[in-house]
Image (spheres, coloured by chain):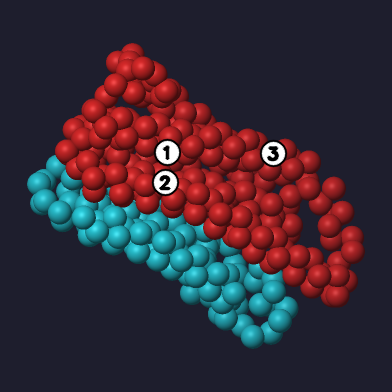
Chain colours: A cyan, B red
Amino acid sequence: MNAHANSTTPEHDAGQAHEPLSYGLLTAIWVGLMVLTVVTVTVSRIDLGFLNVAVALGVASVKAGLVIFFFMHLKYENRLIKGMVLTAFIILAIAIGFTFFDVGYRY
Amino acid sequence: MPEHASAHAGPTSDALVRRDDQGSKIGMWLFLFTEILLFGGLFLLYASYRHRFPAAFHSGGKTLDVFIGGLNTVVLISSSLTVALSITALRRGAKRLCLGLLGFTIACAATFMVNKFIEWSAKFHHGLIPGSEHMAQLPHGEAVFYGLYFAMTGLHGVHVVIGASLITWVMLLIRRGKTTGENYVVLENVGLYWHIVDLVWIYLFPLFYLIS
């Protein structure tokens, strides 16, 4: 979408080079988030057993992705911030995942 | 007042200002990571106890009002949209539109808290008050479910209030011309905080209200 974000010149890299996100794009993201909210409520009313949790968390994560990449405009940030955010979420996944493996399967 | 920032705008100082903006954005993200860890720890606790007491979480979730929870989801997501739009508006020079969008965000925050008040009041009415005798005498699973419900939605509610206060503050900065279309990093960072508040709710809603 934006060539400036990937520019190698330090001026562009260090600054807020990206253009403001258009009203249309932001509104489209909002529509997507609304649709996903309806999806998650609807699916929760159907009994799918374990899949219910998987779908709920899956949909929530897609919504989280839309918020992070567009509303928080991570998509248009430089590699440093992208890498930081990725690292933080990997660490969180390790913390929750590994602890839950222990809690879930020990006894 | 807006001329204030651009008064020093030689090529060199302009670059310095830009670099500072980037630094402050990185600082904001670092702070947000601590917020993610804070709520992450509570989600971990939720996962462990839900695994231990699946039936109690199931019946506990049924007592929560999906309509109010869903309404609050719509309210928060919409308020996130208006914050995102307000940055675009300010950068395009539409200051009044920007202030209007931020005002709408604060109205959403107030609506969210009123709904939360209605929900909590209903629970209090049934004797479910954090720290009360009644809560302590509940079966373990239910005590844990409602304990986590109050702790997590309560901590989230505190964040909504803080976020709304920060947005009020940034509105004052915009009105005074200290935050402008050229110097908008404060609005951006306050926006990032507000989106994290939205993000936490995106997980809280299905995990508490939709386990039926």
- Residue B163 versus residue B75: which sits nearer the camera? B163
Residue with the mark numbered 3: B169
Image-based side of A62 in relation to A56, left or right: right
Tell me the amino acid under the disc marked 1.
Answer: Met
Q: Is residue B89 visible?
A: no
Label number found at residue A61: none
Residue with the mark numbered 1: B152
Same chain for the residues at labels 2 and 3, yes or no? yes
Residue with the mark numbered 2: B42
Image-based side of B187 in relation to B56, left or right: right
**Residues at badges 1 and 3 in contact (C-beta under 8 Å)?**
no
First of labels 1, 3 by sequence position: 1
How would you rate the neighbour count of disc 3 (Cα within 10 Å): few for under 14, some for 14-19, many for 20 or more?
some
Q: Chain of mark 3?
A: B
Give the percent coordinates (x, y) of residue B116.
41, 27
How would you rate the neighbour count of disc 2 (Cα within 10 Å): few for under 14, some for 14-19, many for 20 or more?
some
Q: Residue at x 62, y 48 (%)?
A: B190
First of labels 2, 3 by sequence position: 2
The CA span between labels 1 and 3 is 26 Å
For numbered disc 1, what is the local secondary structure? helix
